[in-house]
Image: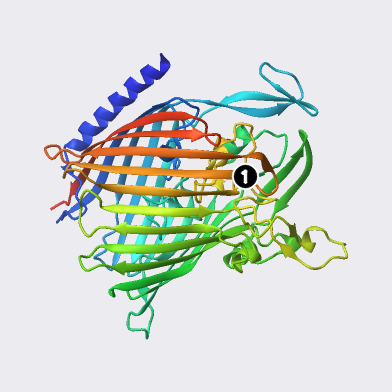
Amino acid sequence: MSWIVSKKRNLALLLVATCAISGAKAADSDAATPGGFAMTGRAEGIFAAGSGDFAPYYIASNNHGILTQSNDALLRLSLDKQPDTKKRFSYGFGIDFLTGYTSSTDYLRFSPDEAPGGMKVTNGWLVPHSEHPSRIWLQQLYGEIRYRGVFLTVGMKQHTSALLSPTLSSGDLVESGNSRPIPEVRIGFNDFQDIPFTSGWLQIQGEISYGKMTDNAWLRDHYNYYNSHLNQGALYSYKRCYFRTKPAERFSATFGMQVGAFFGGKSDWYSNGELTKTASFSKGIKQFFNMFLPTDGGLEYYSGSSLGSWDVMFRYRLNDGATIKAYMQKPWEDGSGIGFLNGFDGVWGIQFTAARKGLVSGAVFEYLDFTNQSGPMHWDPDDAPGTDITNRAEGGDDYYYNHEFNAYANYGMAIGSPFMVSPIYNTDGYLQFASNRIRGFHIGLEGDITPQVSYRLLGGYRRSWGSGRIPFINPKDDTSFMAEASYSPVRLPGLTVKAAFGLDHGELYGNTAGGMVTISYTGLITIPRKR
């Protein structure tokens, strides 16, 4: 009954907010607002229902961590102003929050005492407890300034891949838009900038950010306190540097590297339910400089938890203006991956983008392989001081895992590719990536059936052998699919109704199905300038 009441309440709030915005013009990013100040307002109702604990894989993935549970009734309200790219100096800002009902999931937590539904383990019991996302949370809050080709952003702002399609790809390996945004200070180039003395034949684009993780409470609530470790108070850093050949040419290439990292904070290690070790890591000014170019810091923990990818994309423009892109993202966790000693691991994709809207406007096919990981063995003499063995064997990459910091995730969802099963799905309270030795493929297709109706189809298959440290006794697989349709009526500009159906089949996510309906209205709010 409370779920139905929540649905009605959120629908009512949606209608009120929609009416408030509907007095303004429908949003048009190109609309001129002479003599006034323009902002874009958006009200959205999100309703989902499913058969499992979680939303189907493709409904939850690459959606900025907004919808993870199977049953939801959410209201989303946002207001933003985008910088004016035609001006030398401009500014922007945004605020975005959600509230409403989300279903709960049982996670296991260690207890020395027996409780109903508990499972006997060494020294005690693993007892289920119910958890769900907050009933209200701030999704975005940021301010941004731009001067010529440079920008500075402060706050929480959603980011998507700088290289791969945000709607069709399986997800970027370092920053995909799969998790909630992290509060940060980010500076970089707005777009690719010509490198002097190259006559536009070589361009550069780069960004760097430092941020603060805010999911400490989520981690404490979902951790099992039985095995592995938990870090709290960590800082986050992201760096990217891409080069691109002249885009006006029929053939163009983009190549470079991006890096994400955790550092600082305090970690606790547990074994069989007992706290066995505690360590605090530096987050002083020296560490900020050390994280700019990650190195092996040994016992002083300078390097933090760094991971990244080598990225390469080739683009060819056809006679009619359509483009074909072939790309590769190759992951690395340490020197072995940077040196391409991790075999065929990576994302290997091809993308078609039509020159104009049509029945097929875009298509993507990706093959993903993360089974090599530079071999199973890892030996670093810095980890065992006093030993006589000084040679290094930097294998056992164990993607998105670090033996001192948390998994590469935010609020349980992978910051990078969701293809490796995110920690939120581990209902045993193990907050690492349990299925990162994985291989499979992904397909995406989108287009327009009519000028008002568009569609998107996503599908894929994967097979996992667990991880290098904790392999599965038997491999697990998953087949996932999603069909989505969007309708934007001509007579009600700014209104969009979207429906999606998804299903998962296999042992990784279970055999589940679910659907989602969103109703949104976007309007341009203009504040007239005083005369």
Q: Quadrant of the N terminus?
A: top left
- Looking at the image, which residue is at 35% across and 72% down? 252
Describe the colour scheme in one phrase: rainbow
Residue 66: tell me if it is visible.
no
Badge 1 amino acid: Trp
Q: Is residue 443 above or below residue 330?
A: above
Residue 514 percent across, percent down from the top left: 40, 29
Examine the image and state in which quarter residue 275 appears: top right
Left or right? Give the position of 308 relative to 276.
Answer: left
Q: Position of residue 228 (x, y in %)?
A: 71, 41
> Which residue is the site of mark 1?
465
**Residue at 65 percent of width and 65 percent of height:** 336
Q: Secondary structure at mark 1?
A: strand
Q: Percent position (x, y) of residue 168?
A: 36, 50
Choose top left, top right, bottom left or bottom right for residue 342: bottom right
Residue at (28, 29) in percent of width and height: 14
